[in-house]
Amino acid sequence: MTIVAHFDLELHQMDVKTTFLNGDLDEDVCMEQPTSFAKVGNEDLVCKLNKSIYGLKQASRQWYLKFDRIITQNGFKENTFDDAYI
């Protein structure tokens, strides 16, 4: 914040509470139906996920790949000079 004020920069902030819900899946991922969702006679069916959900092993990686792609497309570049961010 000090640097932003000193150099009169513009600061943007983003909400990361729902971050992992925005990752696209590159593979088919299925899960068991929630107990309250399953209809009688169809309990053996599964749900195919279209997006990441909390607790999914791939969630953080998928979110990072999407974030990196969008940031790069908007002209941002990786900081290669500061080892603290590697």
Image (tube, helix red, strand yellow):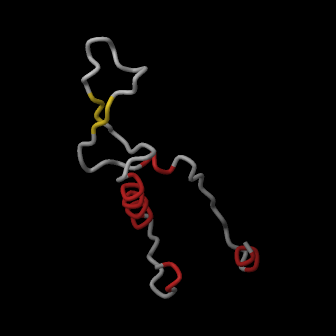
User: Which residue is at 46% across, 79% downward?
Assistant: 86
Q: Say whether residue 5 is left or right of residue 83.
A: right
Quarter assignment of residue 11:
bottom right
Q: As drawn, which residue projects farthest toward the bottom?
A: 81
Q: Is residue 44 above or below residue 8?
A: above
Nearest the viewer among 84 and 9 is 84
In the rendered image, the vertical position of residue 3 relative to residue 62, given as above or below: below
Residue 13 location, x and y as percent?
63, 59
Residue occupying image coordinates x 45% and y 45%: 54
Quadrant in which the N terminus appears: bottom right
Q: Is residue 11 positioned above or below 39 on the image?
A: below
Q: Nearer the viewer, residue 72 or 47?
A: 47
Residue 66, position as x, y percentages in the image: 38, 57
- Residue drawn at x 32%, y 31% is 32
Query: Is 61 positioned to the left or the right of 15 in the image?
Result: left
Residue at the spot 41% in from the left edge and 60% down from the top edge? 64
- Please provide percent x and percent y for residue 14: 59, 55
The answer to whether residue 11 is above or below residue 84 is: above
Specify whether 70 is left or right of 27. right
